[in-house]
Image (tube, rainbow, N blue to C red):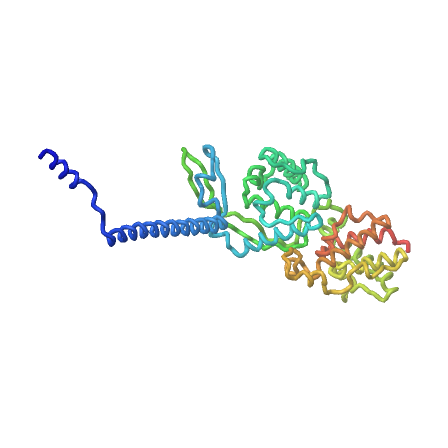
Amino acid sequence: MSSSPILSRRSATSPTTPTNGKSESFLDYLGTLGRKKKLREVEEAVNIEEEGRQAIDSNAQHPIIDALPEEFVLNELEERSMIEPGMINNHDYQELLKILVNWINDELSEQRIIVKDLEEDLFDGQILGKLIEKLSGQKLDVVEVTQNEDGQKAKLRTVLDQTNRLLGIQAKWSAVKWTVGGIHNKNMVQIIHLLVALIRHYRAPIRLPQNVVVNLVVVQKREGHLHTSTVTEQLTGSYDELGMRVEPRDAFDTLFDHAPDKLQIVKRSLINFVNKHLNKINIECYVGPTGVELDPNQFNDGLLLIFLMGMLEGYFVPLGNIFTTAVDPVLEATSNKETAIQPDNYIDSSPINKLHNVNVAFQLMEDSGIQVKQKVRAEDIVNADMKSTLRVLYMIFTKFKHL
């Protein structure tokens, strides 16, 4: 009698074997859960990938704006600035960036240096130092490669100090538009100001877009919080010539400024001297109806200067070493290549050939004892600069006036 309740409880509590149909339902349920979980994982992975792609795309446009608190670690009252996002795609601004990049690549092509991004490629001073060495012809006393931040800033400081000396800028008295900290922090506005100053100073024969203006977002830390404001910054101005006059003032500056009547006499003498010798090979420099309208564009391809030196020195100029046609085969062959050497950026077409010819003429003058490279740049002749052209002709005249 006592055992029956126990048996009863055991039978009540013992598990019952489910039927075959119920077993299949349970397995199907588990399978459905597994498939749903896998679908959720796939969906989450796709969403994460899409978010990453969007983050990359947005940062390519303007990485600083989206991360102000993280990027701008500022001290109290310290400020930084960046270009307003809406200005990034401005046509003139983009055109200016393209010209600056292509100009650097043209200058450093012999060293096989290619710049793609001004911010990323110039901030450490490595390529910027190479550019300064190329433009100035002076070797910088800097470490060739630096990896750590302190080394990069030390190198950049040396490069910028030398640049300021070359540009005639004294930081104590002038409002310098670039700093070591700004360039190293990839401040695009400071980088552009520096490159534009170099182009203007060294009179690179390219045309910059005029009056390029951008809006800057200025971020300042006050009382522990970041405050923003918007200001306007002008990157380029209105230029009536391609560059700044960097040569010391001489007699021609005085003639241009104070004695235009005497300048006409000098022009007439130089034209008569040039035609006297070029007429021997049936070439004549056009002088206009007044006889003194010396057009510097006649000399900007270098050919008249080369032929003149050949006549004065008594040798034949091999035509295979110079370009004698208006067509630029090099430019045509590289028409699909991005380069600063485009006709739109220069006073006239075929700038590569013209610059080559003028450099050949200058070398012929140097070989004859005329120190032309100390007073005139070949780019100035290509740019048809009147004073530079007169200086070259006057140096030739002074050397060979007895002939």
Q: Is residue 70 above or below residue 36?
A: above
- Give the total of numbered labels: 0
Q: Quadrant of the N terminus?
A: top left
Where is residue 23 shown, x and y percent of the image?
A: 26, 51
Q: Furthest residue to the front?
A: 1
> What residue is drawn where x is 45% and y is 32%?
76
Where is residue 368 shown, x and y percent of the image?
A: 86, 50
Where is residue 322 shown, x and y percent of the image?
A: 79, 59
Q: Is residue 48 above or below residue 178?
A: below
Q: Is residue 200 above or below residue 5?
A: below
Q: Is residue 298 above or below residue 78?
A: below
Judge whether residue 109 can be spotted in this image: yes
Front residue of 289/379: it is: 379
Q: Furthest residue to the left?
A: 1
Judge whether residue 272 can be spotted in this image: no
Left or right, residue 299 beside residue 91? right
Where is residue 276 shown, x and y percent of the image?
A: 86, 61
Q: Quadrant of the C terminus?
A: bottom right
Left or right, residue 210 beside residue 36? right
> What residue is drawn where x is 89% and y is 55%?
313
